Amino acid sequence: MSTIVALSTPRGRGALAVIRLSGEKAIAIAKQLGSLDEVEPRRATLTQFRRPNGNEILDQVLLTCFTAPHSLTGEDVVEISCHGSPAVVRSIIDATLELGAVLAGPGEFTLRALSNGKINLAQAEAIRDLIAAQTDAAVRQASRQLNGELSNALGPFKEKLVEAIVLLESAVEFVEEDIPSLRVNEIDNDLAAVSAGVKKLSESYSAGRLLQEGIRVTITGRPNVGKSSLFNGLVERERAIVTDIPGTTRDTLSEAIDLEGIPVILTDTAGLRETTDGIETLGMERTRRAMGDSDLVLVVLDGSAELGPSDRDLISQTSNTRRLLVMNKSDLPTFGASSCCAEDLQAINVSARTGAGLATLRNAILANLNSNGIEDGSLLITNARHFDLLCSTQRELEAARIALREQHSEELVLVPLHNALRLLGQITGETTTEDILSEIFATFCIGK
Ligand SMILES: Nc1nc2c(ncn2[C@@H]2O[C@H](COP(=O)(O)OP(=O)(O)OP(=O)(O)O)[C@@H](O)[C@H]2O)c(=O)[nH]1
Ligand SMILES: [Mg+2]
């Protein structure tokens, strides 16, 4: 197996950078660059790295070596903390390449940890998710999965499946002994319990997906209703330009906010109205695109003015979209509180100017997003691949139960049960093919 090298900290300038080597030659390369006879494993060693051919000093570095199998990858691993200049990093990596290392591919360190049995596939994916996590709640879920909670949750399901398979397989071998009906009920009950457990886990994906991907919320409305003011209120800083001139916002503007642990990408948009202005028209096209791409639309209305035709158009255009109506400028005298109520539209009253009603609006956004389970401490499925596998597992289990109840031959029950077991195994990687593995690891970053 080759010796791989990569920068493990972000690119760019910093006080320090960490370069990682893994493989047979890792320790020999470090010793040669540091002119060291020996390095003690798991102890930090301060040394000067020199160019392999020549005496030029590359940097003063801190080395930590881990010998196989007691390392992240299960191979010999060296971590080099050097000064965080891109030029220093490049010259050290070049020097390791000269001494026989090769550049690591995306996720190759984690892949090696996986092949050496240090972690399972669900944990490898949790490492990627942990690195990508944007909020505390997302970090907590990824850490739980990294600790093996998902694999532990699947363990009892697999055991029950194996038990059922063993019973049925033995019945196949002794053809003349039909499975007594008592046993059929017992197996069916076990399968029903597994199926319900798998279903419950897969249903947590609607909340888990929000954590992982974040949700897109777009603010829309006619010009001057206070969209940008509301945007600033929700992102809690003066991010967008606000003026009393209609048509101030020309382009979409997005910011990430944290709503009770859920990452939300909030987008302010150009106000929608009839116009002949070319730039404004282009901006409005972007508004429509943002609305189409979003999980939730906030339709902002001005409560201090009469609803105009553009307001009405927008209200009817968004009637089949996930939306919240927001009546802004509640600090001003309301223009016939009537206009919205008369039409029986439920709107949330806010004042972007005073901040009144923003807490209610935040809660309404969360309530709209089916975020149940994020904060109640349950394990969530956060990964689309796991979700698909759980859904397919459940389908196979139900097919097996039907075949069992309808007294089909044992083989017809066994095929879907074997499928279910294989699908569950794909989550943790026991039954995952090379193609799937390389597809998953292509989504990792280099150095992980
Ligand atoms: N009294 C009051 N004025 C507000 C409130 N929100 C916004 N405004 C004022 O309304 C005007 C328009 O606000 P913006 O936030 O720029 O409105 P917009 O919807 O982004 O407008 P465009 O970008 O032109 O589409 C500004 O003068 C704001 O100060 C509010 O809650 N109360
Ligand atoms: Mg604006």
Image: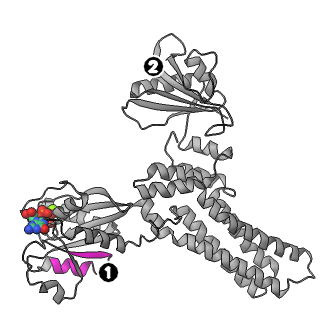
Amino acid on which the number 1 mark rests in the picture: Asn
Q: Which of marks 1 and 2 is in front?
A: 2
The residue positioned 51% from the left and 39% from the top of the image is: 447
Amino acid on which the number 2 mark rests in the picture: Asp
The residue to which callout 1 is attached is 320
Q: State the image quarter where residue 189 is shown.
A: bottom right
Q: In which quarter of the image is ligand 1?
A: bottom left
Q: Residue furthest front?
A: 376
Q: Is residue 173 visible?
A: yes
The residue positioned 69% from the left and 58% from the top of the image is: 431
The answer to whether residue 368 is left or right of residue 225 is right
Q: How crowded is the residue under tag 1: few (<14 C-alpha within 10 Å), some, or many (20+)?
A: few
Which quadrant is home to the N terminus? Answer: top right
Query: In the rendered image of this protein, does residue 56 appear above or below residue 407?
Result: above
Q: Does the magenta stretch include residue 30?
A: no
Is 171 in front, or is 327?
327
For residue 59, the mark is 2
What range of the chain is rendered magenta? 311-326
Query: In the rendered image of this protein, does residue 369 appear above or below residue 83?
Result: below
Secondary structure, mark 1, is: loop
Give the Cα separation between the discs numbered 1 and 2.
62 Å
